[in-house]
Amino acid sequence: MPCGPGRGRGGGGQRKMLFLQSCLLVLLHRGPGYGYSLMSDLREFGVATGQMDISILYRALRDLEAADLVSSAWDEISLGPKRRVYTITPQGEARLGDWMQLLEARRRQIETLEVAYAAVAHPPDRTKDT
């Protein structure tokens, strides 16, 4: 399955796509959305949407849909042009929960690493005690 941490060959593009997919799942966890609204909401996560082509967002949504993590349907109620509305699936909710647990564990590891580095980079001044 193409979606998920640690899958694929790695690389910056893959990590960026995983981050984008994770952000989209969080947004859809809050409620259904359509392409341009999701694009705007991605700014909350520090995504430079002004520099991102909308096709990247739709590719991420298609990948999530192919993995059964989101579903989509045409909005029949819209007064303007029809829009495809995306909704997170139960599988998407479960995957999002798994990813959040993985991120929490990774955050703890990073914090431990930062503390260890700070202890070496800035050792306590032991000459004051003598």
Image: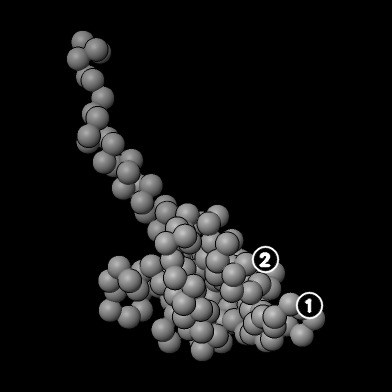
Identify the residue position indicated by label 1 in the image: 79
Position of residue 51 measured from the top left corner of the image (x, y, whole percent): 42, 62
- Residue in the foreground of this view, choosing between 32 and 98: 32
**Which three-letter amino acid code belongs to the residue tagged 2?**
Arg
- Residue in the foreground of this view, choosing between 45 and 103: 45
Tell me whether the residue at label 2 lies in contact with that at label 1, contact meaning CB atoms closer than 8 angstroms: no
The answer to whether 15 is drawn above or below residue 45 in the figure is below
Residue under the image location 21 percent in, 10 percent down: 130
**Which three-letter amino acid code belongs to the residue tagged 1?**
Leu
The answer to whether 81 is drawn above or below residue 119 in the figure is below
Q: Is residue 14 left or right of residue 33?
A: left
Q: Quadrant of residue 53?
A: bottom left
Element on which disc 2 rests = helix
Work out which quarter of the rendered image holds the N terminus and state it. bottom left
Q: Quadrant of residue 3?
A: bottom left
Q: Quadrant of residue 27?
A: bottom right
Foreground disc of the pair 2, 1: 1
- Residue in the foreground of this view, choosing between 112 and 95: 95
Position of residue 79 measured from the top left corner of the image (x, y, whole percent): 78, 77
User: Disc 2 or 1, which lies upstream in sequence?
Assistant: 2
> Residue 30 shows which numbered tag?
2
Residue 39 seen: yes
Position of residue 107 measured from the top left corner of the image (x, y, whole percent): 42, 54
Q: Badge 2: few (under 14), some or many (20 or more) residues near its Cα, within 10 Å? A: few
